[in-house]
């Protein structure tokens, strides 16, 4: 598999792991009787700050997947992964850093660092889109 394929797999797997983590914590809250099974809002409002951050980190992955995953999939389907391969692991790394910061803190410094990791992804995505459109 190419770096693009591994990075796309990593991106999807990371989103899945965040979802599993969130559902394990939610299941614990239901089983322990602290929250009714139908008592969850999609953003985990009313729950711990960590669960709210986890829900947002997962949502960020899902929001970014059609854009960044779409570019990687298009590159692979059109046999142009050579365009995305050099930066594919950088994109995945930036996504993991963004999520990790999101899970750790919402301080102003953390939010700026998280946005910086997202900005790296946007720059890579824009570069890929331009290269895919012009090659």
Image (cartoon, grey):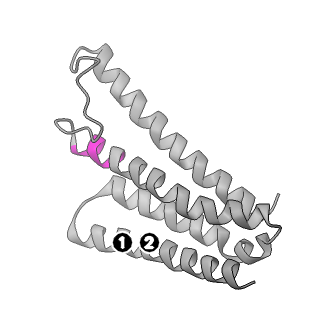
- Residue corresponding to mark 2: 117
Secondary element under disc 1, as helix, strand or loop, is helix
> Residue 93 magenta-drawn?
no
The magenta region covers: 49-54
- For the residue pair 73 and 1, the one nearer the viewer reads as 73
Residue 27, percent across and down?
37, 22
Vertical comparison of 66 with 130: above or below? above
Q: Is 114 on the left or on the right of 124, as rendered?
A: left
- For the residue pair 69 and 135, the one nearer the viewer reads as 135
Are the residues flagged by discs 1 and 2 in contact, CB closer than 8 Å?
yes
> How far apart are the two marked residues, 1 and 2, measured between alpha carbons?
5 Å
- For the residue pair 21 and 39, the one nearer the viewer reads as 39
Vertical comparison of 97 with 120: above or below? above
Residue at point 60%, 59% (across, down): 69
Vertical comparison of 59 with 131: above or below? above
Residue at point 30%, 74% (across, down): 112
Q: Is 19 on the left or on the right of 130, as rendered?
A: left
- Residue corresponding to mark 1: 115
Residue at point 35%, 45% (across, down): 54
Residue 4, percent across and down?
72, 64
Secondary element under disc 2, as helix, strand or loop, is helix
């Amino acid at each position: 598999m190419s770096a693009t394929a591994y990075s796309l797999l990593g991106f999807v797997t990371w989103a899945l792991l965040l979802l599993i983590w969130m559902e394990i914590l939610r299941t614990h809250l239901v089983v322990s009787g602290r929250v009714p099974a139908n008592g969850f809002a999609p953003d985990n409002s009313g729950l711990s700050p960590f669960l709210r951050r986890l829900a947002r980190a997962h949502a960020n992955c899902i929001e970014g997947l059609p854009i960044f995953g779409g570019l990687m999939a298009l590159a692979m389907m059109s046999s142009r992964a050579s365009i995305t391969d050099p930066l594919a692991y950088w994109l995945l790394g930036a996504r993991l850093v963004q999520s990790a910061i999101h899970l750790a803190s919402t301080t102003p410094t953390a939010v700026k660092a998280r946005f910086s990791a997202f900005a790296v992804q946007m720059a890579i995505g824009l570069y890929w889109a331009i290269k895919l459109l012009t090659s």
